[in-house]
Amino acid sequence: MKVILRNNADGKLEVYVAKKDLEEVVVSQEIDGESKILTLTNGWRLSIPKDQPEKLPLTIDAKRLEDDD
């Protein structure tokens, strides 16, 4: 799915998913091989390619990871 990474007014990294009309702050980031895993405030975990330009906002393909439950 296409997502937009940007900084919010508080300077925190935020993810916007247009198709879901979802706007959530990233609460943690971790590296997993060639991917970066972003955990959002709503509990979603998104996988994005590890090597990305630092300039924001950035539109990128992300994959939602299933819950481990």
Image: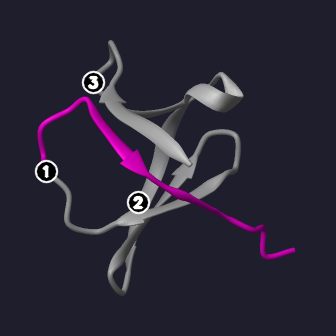
| Most foreground residue, 60 or 56 | 60
- Camera-nearest label, 1 or 2: 1
Quarter where residue 50 is shown: bottom left
Q: Which residue is mark 1?
A: 53
- Nearest to the observer: residue 8 or residue 51: 51
Give yes or no for contact between labels 1 and 2 (Cβ–Cβ under 8 Å).
Answer: no
Q: Residue at x 56, y 49 (%)?
A: 1
Q: Quadrant of residue 6?
A: top left
Which circle marks residue 11 in the picture?
3
Q: Amino acid at mark 3?
A: Gly
**3 or 2: tag closer to the N-terminus:** 3
Circle 1 Cα neighbour tier, 10 Å, few/some/many (<14 / 14–19 / ≥20): few
Report the front residue among 47 and 27. 47
Of the numbered discs 1 and 3, the one sitting upstream in the chain is 3
Residue placed under numbered mark 2 in the picture: 29
Q: CA distance from mark 3 to mark 2?
A: 16 Å
Residue range of the region highlighted in magenta in the rendering: 54-69
Query: x, y (%) of residue 59?
Result: 34, 38
Marks 1/2: CA–CA distance: 16 Å
